[in-house]
Image (cartoon, rainbow, N blue to C red):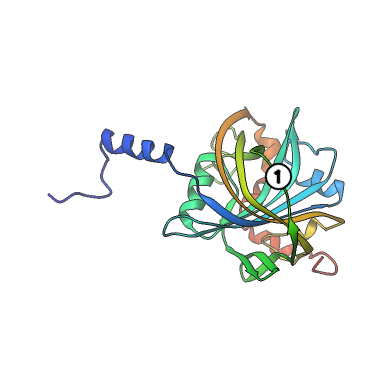
Amino acid sequence: MARVRYGARTEAEIAATRAQSAALPDIWSTGVVAVWETDPDVVAAVLPPPLEPTGRPLVRVTVSRVDLPGHPLGAGSVSVAAAHGDREGWYPLVMPMTHERALTGGREVFGEPKKLGEVLVEREGLTVRASLARHGIAFVEVRGAVSGELPLPGPTERTDFYFKFLPAVDGSGFESDPVLVHCLRREKVRRLERVTGDVVLRESMFDPVADLPVRRLVEITLGEKTTDQRGRVAERVDPAALLPFLHQRYDDPRQALDAPREGGAV
């Protein structure tokens, strides 16, 4: 009988897959990063317990083109500064990806809030434009011009916070206690440039990042970097405390009833 591809894999095949995943070469990406200060009460409002605000209400947008062999990937995120105990990091609200493979792996393993979307990074001469879009709306756009080289930082580490959970079969709550994941990202940079420009936030009922207004732009950079990551479960969290934030993970149709912010774009 011919091999049935949906059939069980052998122990040797499973071990080979794990070994191959553990020995991936450096994968470089070209991306735009924009950081700004927003309203402190807005950051506090989007953080599920036990995450808390840091001393500065920062928002961080990344828009990257990842040089995967044969399968270039667009990857982005919109995150707010957060703390868990004495550890500070970033809590992503949405992470658009252009490939389903990148989406499912991150969501199922780490609990990343990934969604299929459009990710654009363009450079023409000194002009730079980057955007994240879903449902036909470019809800974040970063635009500007390269204004100089920046010194290369040494290897750095940062923590991202995710909530990993499984909704209950009956549609009420969770199937088991959710967990808070610490994802440690180690990053190396081989090129970094300063960008002078601005950030535009557009109203979207599905990706309401316009609720995080740009009060003071901190920086915009364009860089080439490679990153690896490893995660661990930090603690189990109170299901009742996380449940009011469940809609962050999905395109909740009830969000269509929410009134848009006055003025639309910020």
Left or right of residue 79, residue 196 in this image: right
Q: Quadrant of residue 56?
A: top right
* Residue 194 locus on image (x, y percent): 75, 57
Which residue: 76% across, 27% down?
86
**Which residue matches tag 1?**
244
Which residue: 65% across, 54% down?
223
Q: Amino acid at mark 1?
A: Pro
In this view, the residue farthest toward the left is 1
The C terminus, quarter of image: bottom right
* Residue 187 locus on image (x, y percent): 61, 42
* Residue 43 locus on image (x, y percent): 80, 46
For residue 178, above or below residue 150: above
Which residue: 71% across, 38% down?
89
Q: Quadrant of residue 74?
A: bottom right
The residue nearer to you, when weighing 222 against 261, is: 222
Which residue: 81% across, 43% down?
44
For the image, the number of numbered tags is: 1
The residue nearer to you, when weighing 33 against 132, is: 33
Mark 1 Cα shell of 10 Å, populated few (<14), some (14-19), many (≥20): few
